[in-house]
Image (tube, helix red, strand yellow):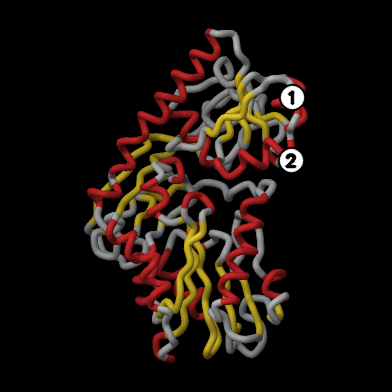
Amino acid sequence: MVTVSTTCRSCHRADGDIVLDLGAQPSSELFPKIDDPGPDELFPLRMWLCASCGLAQLADDADVPEEVVGAEPAALTTQRADAVRELAAAGAFPSTGTAAEFPSPHGGTWLDLLAGHGFTAVPLGSGDGAGADLVVDGCFGVMHESDQHAALAERTAAVGPGGRLVVQFHSLHAIVSGAQWNALRLGHYAYYSTPAMIGMLGRAGFTVTTARRFPLYGGTVALVAGRTSESPAVDTAAVDAVVTPELAAGMLRSGKVAALQQSVQRTAGSLREMLVAQRDAGRRVYGYAAASRAVSLLRLADLDAGLLRGVADASPGKQDRRMPGTDIPIVTPEDLVAAEPDVVLVFVSELVAEARAALPEIERRGGTWVDAGAGR
């Protein structure tokens, strides 16, 4: 069942524009069994930008399953450690105390890293109700919440007096500047620019005290915030360093964000042309990483197992299954090596180096790794 969202998920205003339309797409979280012929259920996949608060969001609500937690890429583990180290070194956290974390379908945690900086992990809502000294949503969890206003209210309410909230997200600026249109997916309800997130936190009674931008996914932003009523000290230079380029790029304006639409056919069409040429030349092409962002790319490129023979993924939960909306099987990394592919398309740019290091046999046998992330 699909219902059209007519009001902003954060500020509840109704004025806004569709800035990206990927048509009807299968769920990117439900990987059918390989012997299930389909057809797979399709849902509208559109991005709407609120003209009032600037939050980019799914225009429609669809009942889709939660994300299948796969093997976490090393790039995410490294970035998380970098974020904790940089923010701690900048004095962005309380000096010590308790730390609580909101879970994410993506997996991962900051708590073990924070323990090394003197924080004791506590469950959300534990203790006398006073809240934790540090509350973290650092693994892209909040974007999975349909009601963004309620999600921010829940996170800010979990922060104790004098405490701090950390929110980390893949920035809309990175998505637009990198033509990463396939970051749009069912179940990911919000796509934040830094100015929009600062506004959301402000409406929840919190002031952003510092900001950091990391290279993960072309631009991942971590914000730290404290209660406005407590007049927290603000590192204005650090915040401006992240906000100013995003404002200059027009991340609150639908005309600028809508540039994403122009890159869709170019990327999908180029991928299909390349695979047709490879097939006609008798070359074997496989994919690597059965990631949710690959689903819309494969469908819009109109690919099947005749063009892309399989997609390798290390996640046991995706074995013996196929890519949604296609007949392309998901295979193990060992199966990929045994197939001796001529070309392997990597659908997550951050995995290219990791895949090459893990499967050196591909290149030893004459195969080539190709970065096939959208926007490439």
Question: In what quadrant of the picture does the C terminus appear?
Answer: top left
Q: Residues within 10 Å of mark 2 (few under 14, many from 20)?
A: few
Q: Nearer the viewer, residue 338 or 304?
A: 338
| 362 sits to left or right of 307 | right
- Label 1 element class: helix
The answer to whether residue 65 is above or below residue 204 is above
Identified by mark 1, the residue type is Arg
| 131 sits to left or right of 363 | left
Q: Which residue is mark 1?
A: 364
Q: Earlier in the sequence, mark 2 or mark 1?
A: 2
Looking at the image, which residue is at 50% across and 68% down? 167
Q: Quadrant location of residue 350?
A: top right
Do tag 2 and tag 1 residues touch (Cβ < 8 Å)? Answer: no
The answer to whether residue 26 is above or below residue 119 is above
The numbered dot on residue 316 is 2
Question: In what quadrant of the picture does the N terminus appear?
Answer: top left
Can you tell which of label 2 and label 1 is closer to the viewer? 1
Identified by mark 2, the residue type is Pro
Q: Is residue 324 visible?
A: yes
Q: Is residue 336 visible?
A: no
Looking at the image, which residue is at 28% across and 45% down? 258
The answer to whether residue 227 is above or below residue 319 is below
Q: Nearer the viewer, residue 338 or 86?
A: 86
Q: Position of residue 199 (x, y in %)?
A: 34, 71
Q: Position of residue 165 (x, y in %)?
A: 52, 76
Q: Position of residue 175 (x, y in %)?
A: 41, 48
- Label 2 element class: helix
Looking at the image, which residue is at 47% across and 46% down? 186
